[in-house]
Image (spheres, helix red, strand yellow):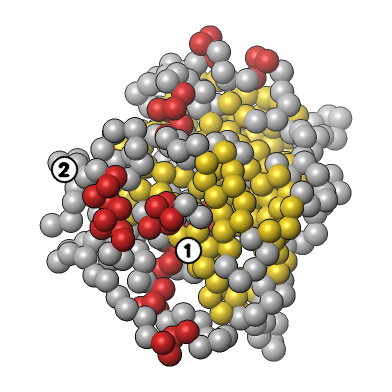
C-alpha cells in the first residue's frame, strides 16, 4: 500500500531518498525510468516516459483541485456562469466605478498533494491556493468572508487599504461561524497576494490559507498567455520541515501535464512564494531567459535572467517568448525542492496554419 499520512509518518530525509530514485511511489513501489539517448535529439519533445522520470507513479484523484485549470483561472472564470454568480459579481457604483464582489469561505478540507498523499488543509473555498482575485487599479473590491472552519481566521490583502480592512490584529479575527466584509479600492497595480493573518501565522499560512490578488494597470499590459504559479510546500508529518514541494500544490503535476504555450507568443507568469519553513524559494527556466518585474509595480523589467529567488511572500511577474518548439523544464533551483515535487515542463508548440 502507498504511504498514508493519516496512519504513517515519513521524515523529510526519507522523502528525499525516495524522490531521488525518481518517484514518490505508489502501488507496487518505486519506479526509476531511464531516458535513452535518442530522446535527446535537438528540437524533439521529451518522450512521455522521460517526462515522468522524475515524479510519482500514478495521478491524483479526478474531480479534485486541478493545477492545470488553476493556471489560467481568476475571478472564478473556471465555473459555469450560473455557478460563478454565487461567488463573483460585477456592478457599477453611482460614480461609475466598477464594483467587484467576491464570496470567500474558510473551510477545513483534506487535499491530495501527490498520488495517495493527503494533507489536512485549511482552505479558501475548498482549494489550495485559494481562488485568484483580479481587478483593475481603481476598482472597488468587496469580499464577504465567511469562516466555516474550526479556528479563527482572517483575510489580509497586500496592497493599500484602511487599517480596519487589514485583517491582522486580534480584534480582526473572524470566529468559526462568523463573517466579515472587506472593502477597499484596488491599488497599487501589481502582483499581490492575500492570506490569513491569525496567529500562529506560520501555521495558518502553511495549512493553505493563501491566494493570489492581481491588480492590473489602467493602461493594460500587452496581451499574453497568462499563468498563475504559487510556490508552496507541505509538512506532512508536522515536524516543521517540508516533505513535499510543488508549484500549485500537486507535486510534479506539470511533469505529467506540461504547460502548453505557443512558440513566439508572449507568456506572462504571475509567480509568488508562499512556502513556509524555508527562507527562500526559486524559479529556474531551462533554455530560456525572461524579464522579471518584481512585485509588478513597474512597467520596466528589473532583471533579465533565467533564475529568480523569492523570499516568503515575495512575488514577481515574468515575461518571455519561447523561440523553439519542444519541452522546456522549469523547477526550483534548490535541488532538494525539485526532487521533492517542485518541477515541471513547458511544452512550446508551433501555431497551426489554420490559426
Callout 2: 10 Å neighbours few (<14), some, many (20+)?
few
Q: Is residue 233 shown to the viewer in this render?
A: yes
Residue 321 — which label? none
Q: Is residue 140 shown to the viewer in this render?
A: no
In terms of depth relative to the viewer, which is nearer, 282 or 267?
282
In terms of depth relative to the viewer, which is nearer, 102 or 255?
255
* Number of numbered markers: 2
Locate residue 20: give its quadrant: bottom left
Q: Residue at x 65, y 80 (%)?
A: 324
Q: Residue at x 50, y 16 (%)?
A: 173
Q: In which quarter of the image is the C terminus?
A: bottom right
Q: Which residue is drawn at 61% across and 39% down?
A: 314
**Residue 241 point in image, percent of width and height:** 34, 37
Q: Which of marks 2 and 1 is nearer the N terminus?
A: 2
Q: Indicate left or right for 150 with 194 as reference.
A: left
Query: What is the distance, in whole Å, between disc 2 and disc 1 at their CAs?
Result: 28 Å
Residue 344 — which label? 1
Asked if 74 appears above or below 149 in the picture, the reply is below
Asked if 115 appears above or below 196 in the picture, the reply is below
The answer to the question of whether label 2 and label 1 lie on touching residues, with beta carbons closer than 8 A, is: no
**Residue 83 point in image, percent of width and height:** 52, 48
**Residue 162 point in image, percent of width and height:** 71, 18
Q: Indicate left or right for 238 with 42 as reference.
A: left
Q: In which quarter of the image is the N terminus?
A: bottom left
Residue 8 — which label? 2
Locate residue 92: give its quadrant: top right
- Mark 2 lies on a secondary structure that is loop
- Mark 1 lies on a secondary structure that is strand
Amino acid at each position: 500500500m502507498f504511504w498514508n499520512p493519516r496512519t504513517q509518518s515519513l521524515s523529510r530525509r526519507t522523502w528525499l531518498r525516495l524522490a531521488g530514485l525518481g518517484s514518490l511511489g505508489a502501488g507496487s513501489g518505486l519506479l526509476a525510468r531511464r531516458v535513452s539517448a535518442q530522446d535527446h535529439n535537438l528540437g524533439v519533445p521529451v518522450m512521455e516516459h522521460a517526462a515522468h522520470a522524475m515524479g510519482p507513479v500514478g495521478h491524483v484523484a479526478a474531480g479534485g483541485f486541478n493545477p492545470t485549470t488553476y493556471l489560467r483561472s481568476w475571478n472564478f472564470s473556471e465555473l459555469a456562469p450560473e455557478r460563478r454568480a454565487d461567488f463573483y459579481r460585477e456592478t457599477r457604483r453611482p460614480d461609475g466605478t466598477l464594483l467587484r464582489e467576491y464570496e470567500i469561505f474558510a473551510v477545513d478540507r483534506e487535499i491530495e498533494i501527490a498520488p495517495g498523499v493527503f494533507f489536512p488543509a485549511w482552505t479558501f473555498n475548498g482549494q489550495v491556493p485559494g481562488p485568484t482575485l483580479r481587478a483593475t487599479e481603481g476598482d472597488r473590491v468587496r469580499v464577504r468572508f465567511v469562516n466555516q472552519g474550526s479556528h479563527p481566521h482572517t483575510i489580509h490583502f497586500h496592497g493599500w487599504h484602511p487599517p480596519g480592512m487589514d485583517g491582522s490584529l486580534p480584534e480582526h479575527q473572524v470566529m468559526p461561524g462568523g463573517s466579515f466584509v472587506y472593502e477597499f479600492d484596488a491599488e497599487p497595480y501589481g502582483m499581490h497576494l492575500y492570506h490569513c493573518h491569525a496567529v500562529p501565522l506560520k501555521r495558518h499560512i502553511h495549512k493553505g490559507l493563501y491566494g493570489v490578488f492581481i491588480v492590473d494597470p489602467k493602461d493594460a499590459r500587452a496581451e499574453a498567455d497568462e499563468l498563475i504559479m504559487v510556490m508552496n510546500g507541505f509538512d506532512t508529518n508536522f515536524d516543521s520541515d517540508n516533505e513535499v514541494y510543488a508549484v500549485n500544490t500537486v507535486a510534479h503535476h506539470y511533469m505529467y501535464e506540461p504547460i502548453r504555450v505557443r512558440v513566439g507568443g508572449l507568456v506572462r507568469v504571475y509567480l509568488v512564494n508562499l512556502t513556509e519553513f524555508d527562507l527562500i524559494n526559486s524559479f529556474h527556466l531551462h533554455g530560456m531567459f525572461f524579464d522579471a518585474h518584481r512585485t509588478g509595480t513597474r512597467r520596466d523589467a528589473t532583471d533579465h535572467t533565467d533564475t529568480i529567488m523569492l523570499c516568503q511572500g515575495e512575488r514577481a511577474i515574468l515575461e518571455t517568448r519561447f523561440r523553439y518548439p519542444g519541452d522546456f523544464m522549469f523547477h526550483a533551483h534548490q535541488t532538494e525542492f525539485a526532487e521533492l515535487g517542485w518541477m515541471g515542463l513547458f511544452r512550446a508548440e508551433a501555431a497551426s496554419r489554420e490559426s
